[in-house]
């Protein structure tokens, strides 16, 4: 079972503005990504993450932004 590290994986990414300023932790599970905030995120934060993951479903629920897994390609 994977456990979040409690930290952003790469501080350089945060410095470049890759994550919203309120980001407290980023956890990955396969192609899914969960961004936890120190406070509620806003629509600007959501749009920043959507820009980083184009074509993916990204949702906002208070202090959590979820980038949903890529659907499997049916054959």
Image (tube, helix red, strand yellow):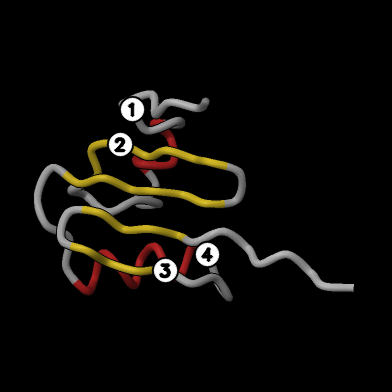
**Residue appearing at x 58%, y 75% in the figure:** 55
Q: Position of residue 34 (x, y in %)?
A: 38, 48
Residue tagged 1: 7
Q: Where is residue 9 in the image (x, y as percent from the top left)?
A: 45, 30
Q: Distance between the residues labelled 4 and 1?
A: 20 Å
**Residue appearing at x 38%, y 24% in the figure:** 5
Q: Which of marks 2 and 3 is nearer the N terminus?
A: 2
Look at the numbered discs 4 and 1 and tell me whether their residues touch, using CB distance below 8 Å: no
Answer with left or right where residue 10 lies relative to residue 74: left
Secondary-structure class at tag 2: strand
In the rendered structure, find residue 25 and report the number of the disc placed on it.
2
Look at the numbered discs 2 and 1 and tell me whether their residues touch, using CB distance below 8 Å: yes
Which residue of the protein is positioned furthest toward the left in this rendering?
39
Residue tagged 3: 58
Look at the numbered discs 3 and 4 and tell me whether their residues touch, using CB distance below 8 Å: yes
Secondary-structure class at tag 1: loop
In the rendered structure, find residue 37 and report the number of the disc placed on it.
none
């Amino acid at each position: 079972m994977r456990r979040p590290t409690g930290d952003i994986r790469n501080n350089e990414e945060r410095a470049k503005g890759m994550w919203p300023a309120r980001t407290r932790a980023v956890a990955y599970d396969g192609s899914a990504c969960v961004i936890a905030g120190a406070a509620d995120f806003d629509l600007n934060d959501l749009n920043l993450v959507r820009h980083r993951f184009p074509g993916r479903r990204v949702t906002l629920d208070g202090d959590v932004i979820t980038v949903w897994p890529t659907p499997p390609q049916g054959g």
